[in-house]
Image: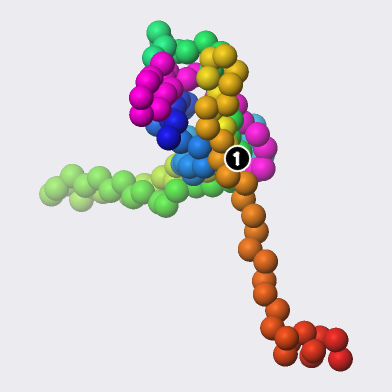
Amino acid sequence: MSYAIIQTGGKQYKVKAGEILKIEKLEESKPNTKIEFKEILAYGNDKNIEVGSPVVKGAKVEANLIKNAKNRTILIFKKRRRQNSRRKNGHRQQYSLIRINKIFSKDGKVLSEAEKITKPVKKVDKKEEKKISK
């Protein structure tokens, strides 16, 4: 199974094809668009690995943006004892949900590719089919 280590939003992630990942929000991106990550620190599989210094030139990872959203609220409560002083604040961090499609090597070859997503087809019973036709 091939994997790659990408850098985005000041963080590093180990990704595999077909994986769904929650990363820092990508600016100016709309859902169902293709994203390319060019900052690949390393890639490989179980047998061999290619490490960059600091990045592997020519390697890239393709992903689809599923959605942009906000995390749950984190409450910040500060209190100074015996001073009758307290402060309550909240924060919701924005994130992007992405699905990794392909991992390319520095030569441009596809190392691994995610399976296509197929929507489940709803089965119609024969009884319901007769009701619909009448």
- Image side of residue 110 versus residue 85, left or right: right
- Image side of residue 128 versus residue 54, left or right: right
- Image side of residue 18 versus residue 31, left or right: left
Q: Quadrant of residue 93?
A: top left
46 falls in the magenta region: yes
**Within-10-Å neighbours for mark 1: few <14, some 14–19, many 20+:** many
Q: Amino acid at mark 1?
A: Leu
The residue at the far left in this view is 82
The quadrant in which the C terminus is found is bottom right
56 falls in the magenta region: no
Q: Please state which of residues 76 and 45 is positioned toward the viewer in this rendering.
A: 45
Answer whether residue 12 is visible to the viewer in this image.
no
Q: Please state which of residues 88 and 5 is positioned toward the viewer in this rendering.
A: 5
Q: Position of residue 18 (x, y in %)?
A: 52, 42
Q: Quadrant of residue 109?
A: top right
Q: Which residues are magenta?
A: 31-50
Q: Which residue is mark 1?
A: 65
The quadrant in which the N terminus is found is top left
Q: What count of labels does the image hold?
A: 1
Q: Position of residue 72 (x, y in %)?
A: 42, 52
Q: Position of residue 29 (x, y in %)?
A: 64, 35
The residue at the far front in this view is 47
The residue at the far right in this view is 134
The residue at the far top in this view is 53
